[in-house]
Amino acid sequence: GQQLNQSPQSMFIQEGEDVSMNCTSSSIFNTWLWYKQEPGEGPVLLIALYKAGELTSNGRLTAQFGITRKDSFLNISASIPSDVGIYFCAGQLRGGGADGLTFGKGTHLIIQP
Amino acid sequence: GAVVSQHPSRVICKSGTSVKIECRSLDFQATTMFWYRQFPKKSLMLMATSNEGSKATYEQGVEKDKFLINHASLTLSTLTVTSAHPEDSSFYICSTTQGSGYTFGSGTRLTVV
C-alpha cells in the first residue's frame, strides 16, 4: 500500500527557533494535508495543499506541495511553547473525500525553554 | 466549522466483552465515515470506510467480524469492538469529510484488561 515517509521522527529545539519537517512518498497524492495532534486528542488540520507546487501559509506555518505530488514540507517559524505536539503529514489519493487518508509516522516536536 | 462528536473518550473493559464507540456529525450529514486506529507513539492507520446505508469497506488485515461498523443514519456511525482482547487496546478515531476537508473526532482510548 501507499506509505508516507516522514522525517525527522523527533525534534528537540529551543524556543524561537525555526522548524522544518518533510514527507515523501513513492505514490502520487491528489491532496496533501498537515495535522497536529495533542495527547489524547484527534488530529487538527493545519494546512491543506491541493495543487502541485502550491505554497501555503497559516500564520507562522508554511507548507509546500511538491511539483511531482510525491512530497511536501512544513515549516514553523519562531517556535513557541504551544507548538509542542506531534505533527503528521497525510495524503489523499483521489479527490472528492471518498478515500481515507494515509498518514506519515509523525514528527514529535519538543521545545526546550 | 464541521464538528464530529465521538464518545466515549475513554473506556476500560474486561477481556472478552464488547465495546461500542459512537461518532456523530453535528449540524451536517456525514455520508462517509472513516475509522482509524492509533497505537501509542504510532501513526493513524485506516481501518475501514463506512458509507451510510451500505456495508463498510475494511482495509487489508482488519477483521470485519471483530470490528463491526454500523452507519445507519447520516449523522451516526458506530464501531463495535467485539470480544475485545488486550491487544485491541488502542486509540480509535473517526473522521468524516465535508466539502474538501476532513474532520476528526476527539478519539476513544480503549483499554482492555
Image (cartoon, coloured by chain):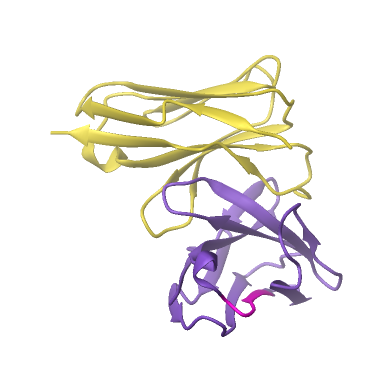
Chain colours: A yellow, B purple
The residue lying at 48 percent from left, 56 percent from top is A42
| Quarter holding residue A77 | top left
Count of number-bearing discs? 0
The residue lying at 41 percent from left, 31 percent from top is A9
State left or right for residue B66 relative to residue B52: left
A48 lies above or below B98? above
Residue B81 belongs to magenta span:
yes
Residue A108 image point, x, y percent: 36, 37
The residue lying at 74 percent from left, 25 percent from top is A28
Image quadrant occupied by the N terminus of chain A: top right
Taken as a whole, is the magenta stretch helix, strand or loop?
strand
Residue found at the very far right of the displayed protein: B54
- Choose between A2 and A70: the one closer to the eye: A2
Magenta range is B77-84
Residue B31 image point, x, y percent: 77, 64
| Quarter holding residue A21 | top left
- Whether residue A34 appears in this view of the structure is yes
A15 lies above or below B47? above
| Quarter holding residue B19 | bottom right
State left or right for residue B41 relative to residue B27: left
Image quadrant occupied by the C terminus of chain A: top left
- Whether residue A64 appears in this view of the structure is no
- Choose between B80 and B26: the one closer to the eye: B80
The residue lying at 51 percent from left, 80 percent from top is B15
